[in-house]
Amino acid sequence: MDVMHIITVVAAVATVVALVFAWAQLRHAQQQARDLQTITSSLSTRYLRQFPNFSTDIASLLARARQRIDVFCDLPAYGLVSNQQAWFEIEQVIRRKLQEQVEVDVMFYDKKRREEVLREQADHKDFRSAGEHVTAALSRLLEDADDARTVEELTQEQILQLCLKRHEQVANEVYRGASAKVDATVSKPLPVYFWMIDTEEAVFSIPIFSGDSTEYGFSTRDRDLVAALLEMRDRYRKMSGTPRTRR
């Protein structure tokens, strides 16, 4: 056997060994990734995403409700413009769960505070130039209101009133039949928002009131945290003069 043949055989064997080693390393890395994902998924509280991207998580959560839904947030139609498709999903789930006789308890800002919040948003951005998804969302609101105007024809004030009107409709129509009356509202800034099912699991968000304000979304199954969220809601309910609901 000549030297070149030996070198060729050795090189081929080395290549095969290297490929096998690489394959084994890849399998090990994939297993570690799966183990990490399993650990992350099993954590009782974990970070989701920034607003409005966790709105789909809210819809998924509420769809799993068997007996009870608790909603505690700033605006009735949460994500109405920022993530309209996700809001439509949330709306449909709420309507369906009410038909299924699931108990729904809601609490959000009163009319005055809603307007203040939306005006604060309007002071920081022009809705008419906030991006294609905002324009599309506003166009849908105009269509639903049988308004033939385009978004470009509206003033900031008109856009504000359009959104306020829709939030009021959601409060009075979508949540009609909820165990907490529509007037179960608060006027003080809320430090956290949450959506909870069966007093067991929740998506909650922490709003950041500075600069380009946003929210950070989390999910939790932690019993103590779930209890703390409900206790906080009950304190706000007491301050607003609305009776505490049973759990």
Image (tube, rainbow, N blue to C red):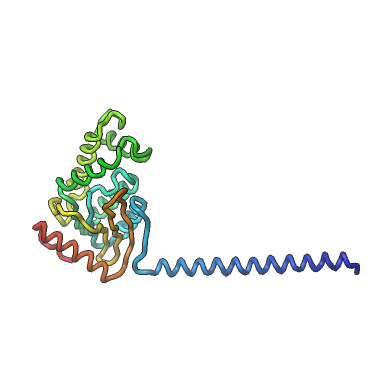
| Residue at x-position 36% and y-position 40% | 133
Q: Position of residue 139 (x, y in %)?
A: 31, 35
Q: Quadrant of residue 47?
A: bottom left
Q: Is residue 177 left or right of residue 63?
A: left
Q: Position of residue 161 (x, y in %)?
A: 20, 37
Residue reaching furthest right? 2
| Residue at x-position 82% and y-position 67% | 9
Q: Nearer the viewer, residue 184 or 174?
A: 184
| Residue at x-position 65% and y-position 66% | 22
Q: How many labels, in total?
A: 0
Q: Is residue 101 visible?
A: no
Q: Is residue 161 left or right of residue 85?
A: left
| The N terminus: image quadrant | bottom right
The relative height of residue 128 versus residue 91 in the rendered view (above or below) is above
Residue reaching furthest front? 211
The relative height of residue 240 versus residue 136 in the rendered view (above or below) is below
Residue reaching furthest left? 241
Q: Is residue 196 visible?
A: yes
Q: Position of residue 68 (x, y in %)?
A: 23, 61
Q: Quadrant of residue 41?
A: bottom left
The relative height of residue 119 versus residue 213 in the rendered view (above or below) is above
| The C terminus: image quadrant | bottom left
Q: Nearer the viewer, residue 125 or 144?
A: 125
Q: Is residue 94 left or right of residue 22?
A: left
Q: Quadrant of residue 193?
A: bottom left
Q: Is residue 41 left or right of residue 164?
A: right
Q: Position of residue 224 (x, y in %)?
A: 26, 71
Q: Nearer the viewer, residue 193 or 211?
A: 211
